[in-house]
Amino acid sequence: MALIHPDFTIGIEEEYLLVDRDSLALADTPEALMEDCKTQLQDQVSPEFLNCQIEIGTKVCRTVAEARDDLKRLRSCVAACAARHNLAPIAASCHPFADWRNQTHTNKDRYNMLAGDLAGVVRRMLICGMHVHVGIDPPDRRVDLMNQLSYFLPHLLALSCSSPFWQGQDTGLSSYRLTVFDNLPRTGLPPRMESFGEFERSVQALVDLGVIEDSSKIWWDLRPSHRFPTLESRICDVQPRLEHALTLAAITQALARMLWRLAVKNQRWRIYDRFLLAENRWRAQRYGVREGLIDFGLGEITPMGDLVEELIELLTEDAAFFESVSEIEGARDMLRSGTSSGRQRQVYSDALHAQDDHDHALQAVVRHLIEEFHADL
């Protein structure tokens, strides 16, 4: 029997915040702006939970090169439409100085239900993420790879951190977004499951009780998608720089294929207890790329530079298959330039040293985020 090679197609979803170009504060999405975007992008753009957010999603792409073209087109369209309303999108997971109490949610059935079900917890969801879908069949393979790919979620998070500030304060964390998101139910690292059937039965138990409508209300860091035959990574902060988003997508795609190659040879990545993986998730959330992650095989904390080099070597064959070697090697640039969290802190510090006060320094961070969003368009 011939070996069935999954498509490993990818799709990227990103959530952006809209800011006023003058005040640099958050702004609600004008209806005309959304209509303008929809006219050009159809169902590739949609409102998000809060009125100050907008979400885009690429088409199904075979390669990261295809995803680059589509993501650049989507970002460019949103930026151009926003500019006509004196607004600008930023791709950071938290706005540096906005107050969640001043935001309103989008008047849409799905979001009205969320606001009712999740009460005060969901009102704090002034956060944006990046999701990467990888096409994998059959469904049981999807769950098997979910169990193994979970090991690498902290690595992806560490590289992606873009949310150091919350309500005008430096949180000391590199990804404060996860601190907010983890207050929701059904979040965090996925549990280990033996089959897609087990996943379906678990979801159905909650559906039958009327707790959720379907698996779209399962918000794990990695999950089988409700709408598509994909494994969906949801761990990453959204990226101000287009190329960094593509690097994270390329690594996710290549990891899935690398683990599939092991599986068809009756091998697998060692599965560690969720408790241990959660420690690395916390380290990534707290330190980003600064302090390294635990290598449970070696039994020591390993610098991110070493982990990135190991990852690049591990994915060599798969990067070549997808022609994404340069994108995956872009992880080195992410280490050299630092995460967005590091760059935001540097902008804030430089502004203070230039005699700016706290509020103006935070505004400088927003201007920096606007510039990074537009730099690759």
Image: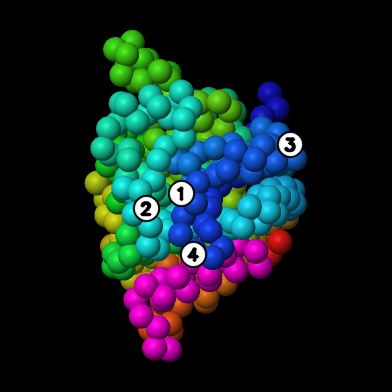
Position of residue 294 measured from the top left corner of the image (x, y, whole percent): 32, 62
Instruction: Identify the residue position indicated by label 3 in the image.
Output: 39
Secondary element at image label 3: helix
Identify the magenta region. Answer: 354-375
**What residue type is disc 1 on?**
Cys
Compared with residue 356, is residue 135 higher up or lower down, i.e. above or below?
A: above
Position of residue 158 measured from the top left corner of the image (x, y, whole percent): 42, 61
Determine if the magenta segment contains residue 367: yes
Position of residue 172 measured from the top left corner of the image (x, y, whole percent): 29, 67
Compared with residue 227, is residue 12 higher up or lower down, i.e. above or below?
A: below
Residue at the spot x=37%, y=29% of the render? 114
Determine if the magenta segment contains residue 259: no
**Counting other residues with Cα less than 10 Å from the Cα at mark 3, is it few (<14), some (14-19), or many (20 or more)?**
few
The span from disc 4 to disc 3 (Cα, nearest Å) is 28 Å
Residue 322 seen from this side: no
As rendered, which of 207 and 155 lies closer to the eye? 207
**What residue type is disc 2 on?**
Arg
